[in-house]
Amino acid sequence: MMRALATALICTALAACNMNEQPKDNEYKPSALFPNGRTLQTPVPGTVARDDLKRSAAIATKPPLTKALLDRGQEVFNINCSPCHGRTGAGDGMIVQRGMPRPPDYTEDRLRKADDQHFFDVITHGHGAMYSYATRVPPADRWAVVAYIRALQLSRHATLDDVPQDRRAKLQSGAPQ
């Protein structure tokens, strides 16, 4: 009996609540809730958005070059960059083959001489027909892509003198690595 009474009371209370007519303020109309009459309030001085400090540190701190960083850079590059830039960075990706403007080849002298921050900024803000990847690629992954772009640049301009002495004989013999 008590269970039925409790269920009836809960159902009556829920029926009295009209979820479609909840009180709320329109952010662009005046409100009596705050003394200044505005719904949208200016943040308190010194307010830091959630994760902004961590994001700022990741943007400002270029990680050390490691195999893991290059592997991650290759993975992110192949997903996000290769459709336009191609897997080798020559600017001959599938999108270009279908009529989009050709991006520059990463081995152009101008880009080989550019500093790492240039590539990071282009990934962040976009350039020319390229849109920003700031919301798609986190800062740590942007640095990984920059490292991988540098590896692509080096690979296309490497000479036998760049190969460590202990691996030259294997390379010259044509044996698989």
Image: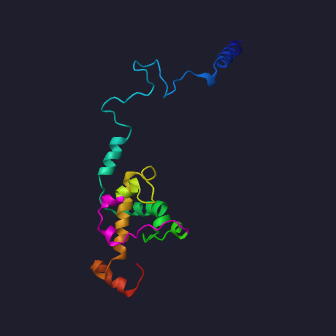
The colour scheme used to paint the residues is rainbow
Report the residue at 32% width, 72% height from top: 109
Q: Is residue 50 above or below residue 116?
A: above
Report the residue at 61% width, 22% height from top: 21
- Answer yes or no: is residue 141 visible: no
Q: Is residue 77 magenta?
A: no
Q: Position of residue 88 (x, y in %)?
A: 43, 71
- Answer yes or no: is residue 71 visible: yes
**The magenta stretch spans which residues?**
98-119
Residue closest to the eye, 13 or 127: 127
Q: Position of residue 165 (x, y in %)?
A: 27, 80
Q: Position of residue 84 (x, y in %)?
A: 48, 65
Q: Is residue 32 above or below residue 161?
A: above
Residue closest to the eye, 32 or 87: 32
Q: Is residue 101 magenta?
A: yes
Residue closest to the eye, 37 or 122: 37
Q: Position of residue 59 (x, y in %)?
A: 33, 50
Q: Is residue 157 above or below residue 9?
A: below
Report the residue at 37% width, 53% height from top: 140
Residue 156 lies in quadrant: bottom left
Where's the C terminus, which quadrant?
bottom left
Q: Is residue 123 above or below residue 149?
A: above
